[in-house]
Amino acid sequence: MDFVDPVVQLPARTILVKALVPNGRRQLQAGMFVEVRLATEVRPKAVVIPEDAIVPLQRAYYVWVVTDGKASRHQVEIGVRSPGFVEIRSGVEAGEQVVVGGQERLAEGAPVAASIVERGPVTPGDSGGPATKVDSSGKD
């Protein structure tokens, strides 16, 4: 980063940023427009789950977790959100299976048949990975 304008331009809420970027193959040309996402912090131990696992309810967020074939609702504190994924600051531990579909049919302790669902690419530094899709029809 070479320069960051301290003034936010409205209504688009943009900030002028100038950066020095290697351009050995001359692919970048003067006057080109670039939209970027700037990572301001990297948390390599972050717990990251699919966004569709989050259930908002009465100003709080919940996630259904599968433990020993049973559903359990956990209140979670969310952190950074990115397209398709959300960081969990508390309420779910790394490695726990979360439900990404059928949450509306679940009840505490309901039997579930979980299957692993592979998700799209995960950005470097987060621990996102396979999610769990659950058949919450009540069958074991």
Image (cartoon, rainbow, N blue to C red):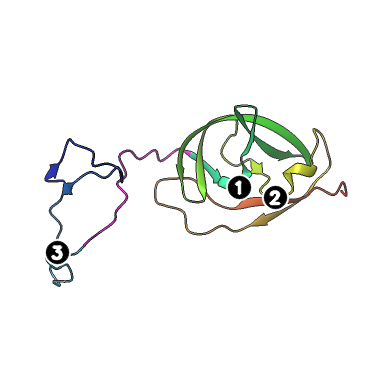
Residue labelled with disc 3: 31
Please report whichever mark, 3 or 1, sits nearer to the chain's N-terminal start: 3
Q: Where is residue 117 in the image (x, y as percent from the top left)?
A: 64, 57
Q: In this view, does 74 lie to the left or right of 10?
A: right
Q: Give the range drawn in magenta.
A: 33-46
Q: Distance between the residues labelled 3 and 1?
A: 39 Å
Q: In this view, does 16 lie above or below 91?
A: below
Q: In which quarter of the image is residue 62?
A: top right
Taking depth in this image into account, of 126 and 120 the one nearest to the observer is: 120
Q: Residue at x 81, y 36 (%)?
A: 107
Q: How far apart are marks 1 and 2 (CA)?
A: 7 Å
* Amino acid marked by disc 3: Gly
Please report whichever mark, 1 or 2, sits nearer to the chain's N-terminal start: 1
* Amino acid marked by disc 2: Gly
Q: Is mark 2 on a helix, strand or loop?
A: loop
Q: Where is residue 90 in the image (x, y as percent from the top left)?
A: 55, 28
Q: Given contact means CB atoms under 8 Å apart, are the residues at marks 1 and 2 in contact?
A: yes
Residue labelled with disc 1: 52
Q: How many marks?
A: 3
Between label 3 and label 1, give the one nearer the viewer. Answer: 3
Taking depth in this image into account, of 30 and 39 the one nearest to the observer is: 30
Q: Quadrant of residue 32?
A: bottom left
Residue labelled with disc 2: 101
Judge whether residue 103 is colored magenta: no
Q: What element carries label 3?
A: loop
